[in-house]
Amino acid sequence: MGMDEPRIAPFKEHLGRRALEPRTHAYADLHICVVRGSLPGADAHFHHDMLAMWCEDENTTIVFESPREDQMRAFIREHCPDAEFLWEGRMPYGNWEADARMAPTHQAGFLICPAWDVCAPEPCETRIVLDPGLAFGSGLHPATQISLGLVRRAMERVRPRHVMDLGCGTGILAVAALLLGAEQATAVDYSLLAVNAARINAQLNGLSLRMRIMHDDLFSHLKSPADLVVCNMNFPLFDSLLKNKDFLSHEWLLLCGVNPESLHREISGKLKAAGRTIMHTERKGHWFGYLTQR
């Protein structure tokens, strides 16, 4: 790992049984329990009830579909007396990403259908069937919508055979590229929640044989060959990637997730300084994305 590449903080995840298979309905509410300290054995104890569990910054978070404070407190008393239960919060599932209920959505020539509400596309639309799980990329966030538009532009202009999606979240951008004609896609994310969602979405769209999904640090794949690299992520990662020669060596890069306009000007300047030509810039509200060529 180079000097300019951020190290990912220790992050351990466990997925519960209820998160591993495609669903026939949306989650209603998410019940999020947060504990100070580690909870060894909790992943096995709650495996059949929880959606996911992760440990980060000395705290443990477990997500359920129904209230579990009493069971969590009992487990801590019996098995982890050094841990401290902090709180349980209820969150409507629609608030997980974009403060909106998942429903069929028309974006950039795509019809994005939740797996539990599949409908026919309009003429000239491309349908994506999606189970976002607990990963980013439902199609409702402006950055995802911009990215989908730029993927369509890239596929019409460049016709890349191999697409690499770094920080893939639900895998929606890799799925979109494959449905528009890419032969192969590689989707990389350090989060098990994302990798699991991308795996399910590849299956839902009949793309499992063409979409390689990897649970890994994206910085380990910057030398991997790809005709188009897509990244929908946050500014600190962009800032590091734009200092990386391996990343910048790719012919076509699609970057999105820049907000607000002051960072848009900064990122645009860094892209040009790195020898990239910005072929298309798209904006939605305060969010920006770019399709660039070397």
Image (cartoon, helix red, strand yellow):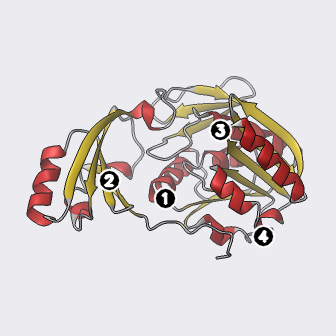
Residue 246, which numbered label?
A: 4
| Amino acid type at image mark 4 | Asp
Percent position of residue 225, x then y: 77, 68
For disc 3, the neighbor class at 10 Å (few under 14, some 14 to 19, many from 20) is: many
Judged left or right of residue 77, residue 133 is right
Residue 293 visible: no
Residue 263, which numbered label?
A: none
How far is mark 4 from mark 2, CA to CA? Answer: 35 Å
> Which residue carries the number 2 mark?
61
Judged left or right of residue 78, residue 287 is right
Q: Residue at x 60, y 66 (%)?
A: 6
How far is mark 1 from mark 2, CA to CA? Answer: 14 Å
Of marks 4 and 2, which one's residue comes earlier in the chain?
2
Asked whether the beta carbons under mark 4 and mark 3 sit within 8 Å of each other, the answer is no
> Which residue carries the number 3 mark?
143
How far is mark 1 from mark 4, CA to CA? Answer: 23 Å
Q: Secondary structure at mark 3?
A: helix
Q: Secondary structure at mark 2?
A: strand
Asked whether the beta carbons under mark 3 and mark 2 sit within 8 Å of each other, the answer is no
| Amino acid type at image mark 3 | Ala
Quarter of the rendering occupied by the C terminus = bottom right
| Amino acid type at image mark 2 | Thr
Of marks 1 and 4, which one's residue comes earlier in the chain?
1
Of marks 1 and 2, which one's residue comes earlier in the chain?
2
Is 47 situated above or below 175?
below
| Amino acid type at image mark 1 | Ser
Is 236 situated above or below 146?
below
For disc 4, the neighbor class at 10 Å (few under 14, some 14 to 19, many from 20) is: some
Question: Which residue in the rendered view is the most extreme toward the top?
Answer: 122
